[in-house]
Amino acid sequence: MLSLDGGNAWRDQTLPRLRAVLPGSWFIPLRALRQDILTFDFRSALATARRPLLFWDAHGFEVAECVLGAILPELAPHPHLVIMHDLSDSRYTAPGSFSYDGQHLWKGVGSSGPRLKLGMIDSAEAQAVSILDFATRNRLPLHSADHSFHVELAGDAIALRSCGSCLEACSRSKAIGSTSV
């Protein structure tokens, strides 16, 4: 398991929270590095990966270019999954979220105005443009956790109870604190 952090958020925030709820064995396969994603040698790091999972939570067009142009080609030969943070599925957002409500157009990175709506993508981050372009050019489907929840879980009472129990346990955990689940 590899984690890259350009700052100290892993060491100062995430690690103490996880240590409070996970056994020490969970951290054994982890390589948590303070490293710039734009200069990291992904080819070497992913050379032995069999089923990589990429959790993408870094913002901006430069990072999107790195992920889409350098990391994904290394993942492509393997069964893999890319999970993106800061994107919602507009099919499941509140109807009022589509209104500008007196605000200006979305103006990109650092915009405090309305979120960007591109098809089913609802985001305030620049990589939303990049991932939609990439998926369209490569004829790749985009799936969302929101859609999966509504289509696959909403009619399954057992799965819903299981998810609810898990979320309830997470919300009570001091490890999660006030962060979103």
Image (cartoon, helix red, strand yellow):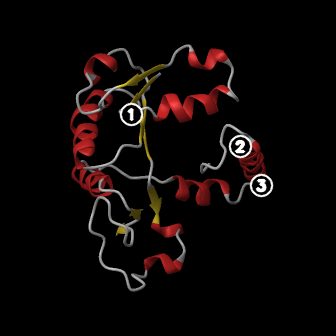
In percent of width and height, residue 30 lies at 50, 19
The answer to whether 60 is drawn above or below residue 129 in the figure is above
The answer to whether 107 is drawn above or below residue 175 in the figure is below
Spatial CA span between label 2 and label 1: 25 Å
Q: Is residue 94 left or right of residue 154?
A: left
Q: Is residue 36 left or right of residue 2?
A: left
Dots 3, 1 in contact, CB < 8 A: no
Q: Which mark is residue 170?
A: 2
Q: Which mark is residue 7?
A: 1
Q: Amino acid at mark 2?
A: Cys
Q: Quadrant of residue 151?
A: bottom right
Kindly identify the residue that appears in the image at 41 percent across and 43 percent down: 57
Secondary element type, mark 3: helix
Q: Residues within 10 Å of mark 2 (few under 14, many from 20)?
A: some
Residue denoted by label 3: 157
Kindly identify the residue that appears in the image at 36 percent across and 81 percent down: 103
